[in-house]
């Protein structure tokens, strides 16, 4: 199932119509049943649980490392492959999809600023042409196509950010009446940018500007606590904390979560849920308690809707507050992009 174009269009319409836990639960059980019949790794995990799926919060989730060691979709069935940017061990995970329709649907309809579009979307990350297996590149390119206006562009040129060209562009754009700016980059790309600009180059970008950082350093620059990074962004770009957003996603997923400001709480779109669980029993922790992040993503049709991470978070009443990776786990993330070498 969910292989023909008609089936996939119907599923996309279904998940976009979800507006309650009840609808989410029904859709999840349908997709989970399909996936347990086609993915051997998920079959093994489900059999080991030895219990029926009664509470959607307890849905078995494959660990992220499975994407490195198991084939969830044969390569001859896939037209799209997204690769993790690697880790300090150099072993990437691979997320194969029959096509990118659900990924495009999730990134397009999960875009938090649809009502403010169009934007001048400015990217500090390689385009899909340079990084064909990067899910982040695919997301940014799709946003530029759907939500970007004619001045939208990528400033990652010839293997690095063209910081001089970006400076001139931002100076020009703030001097004329134009659509709002959406500036997107990894955490380390902002550090590189401001290091190159130095202390003398500072801007006062318009109040409708949005800065989106996608996290991650992983040895590509000096690492800064989130509060210091956001302060650096505010100092150099003349924006407020509330104008800075974090995007939390991963190659193994099709959907993303977003948080506003340094103390922001992450929220998922209606067709995805993040469950903060107690690793000892797999149950959801109480509000205000800490646990590890489990994703349930109904746009993850061609792999596993459930992905178990090693990211720590605090469960909040509406959403979750991301804390970081569990200690003693390998470093990973978009900041290790081999396309930056």
Image: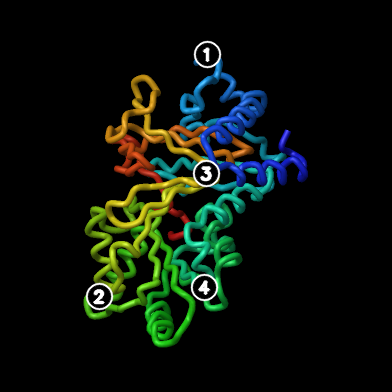
> Residue 52, percent across and down?
55, 16
Q: Residue at 57% of width from left, 50% of height from top?
A: 106
Quadrant in the picture for the N terminus: top right
Which residue corresponds to mark 2? 198
Which residue corresponds to mark 3? 270
Which residue corresponds to mark 1? 51
Quick one: which residue is furthest to the top in this view? 50
Query: Disc 2 and disc 4: Cα gap in Å?
Result: 23 Å
Q: Helix, strand or loop at disc 2?
A: loop
Can you say whether 64 is above or below 156 in the image? above
Query: Disc 3 and disc 4: Cα gap in Å?
Result: 30 Å
- In front of the other: 10 or 37: 10
Q: Would you say residue 312 is visible in this rendering?
A: no
Q: Helix, strand or loop at disc 3?
A: loop
Q: Residues within 10 Å of mark 4 (few under 14, many from 20)?
A: some
Which callout, 2 or 1, points at the residue further toward the start of the chain? 1
Query: Disc 4 and disc 1: Cα gap in Å?
Result: 51 Å
């Amino acid at each position: 199932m969910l292989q023909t174009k008609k089936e996939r269009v119907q599923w996309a319409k279904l998940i976009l119509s979800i507006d309650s836990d009840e609808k989410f639960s029904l859709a999840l059980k349908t997709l989970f049943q399909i996936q347990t019949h086609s993915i051997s790794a998920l079959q093994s995990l489900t059999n080991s649980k030895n219990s029926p799926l009664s509470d959607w919060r307890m849905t078995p989730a494959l660990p992220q490392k499975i994407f490195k060691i198991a084939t969830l979709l044969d390569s001859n069935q896939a037209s799209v492959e997204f690769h993790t940017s690697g880790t300090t061990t150099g072993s990437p995970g691979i997320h194969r999809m029959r096509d990118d329709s659900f990924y495009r649907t999730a990134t397009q309809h999960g875009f938090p600023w649809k009502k403010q579009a169009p934007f001048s979307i400015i990217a500090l990350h390689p385009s899909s042409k340079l990084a064909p297996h990067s899910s982040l590149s695919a997301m940014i390119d799709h946003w530029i196509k759907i939500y970007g206006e004619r001045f939208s562009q990528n400033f990652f040129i010839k293997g690095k950010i063209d910081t001089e060209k970006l400076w001139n562009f931002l100076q020009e754009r703030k001097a004329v009446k134009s659509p709002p700016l959406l500036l997107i980059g990894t955490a380390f790309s902002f550090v590189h940018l401001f290091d190159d600009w130095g202390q003398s180059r500072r801007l006062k970008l318009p109040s409708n500007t949005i800065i989106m950082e996608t996290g991650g350093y992983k040895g590509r620059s000096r690492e800064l606590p989130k509060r210091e990074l956001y302060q650096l962004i505010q100092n150099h770009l003349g924006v407020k904390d509330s104008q800075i957003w974090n995007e939390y996603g991963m190659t193994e997923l099709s959907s993303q979560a977003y948080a506003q400001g340094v103390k922001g709480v992450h929220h998922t779109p209606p067709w995805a849920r993040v469950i903060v669980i107690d690793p000892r029993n797999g149950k959801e922790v109480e509000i205000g308690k800490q646990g590890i992040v489990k994703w349930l993503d109904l746009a993850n049709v061609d792999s596993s809707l459930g992905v178990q991470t090693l990211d720590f978070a605090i469960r909040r009443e509406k959403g979750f507050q991301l804390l970081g990776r569990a200690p003693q786990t390998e470093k990973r993330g978009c900041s290790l992009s081999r396309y930056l070498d």
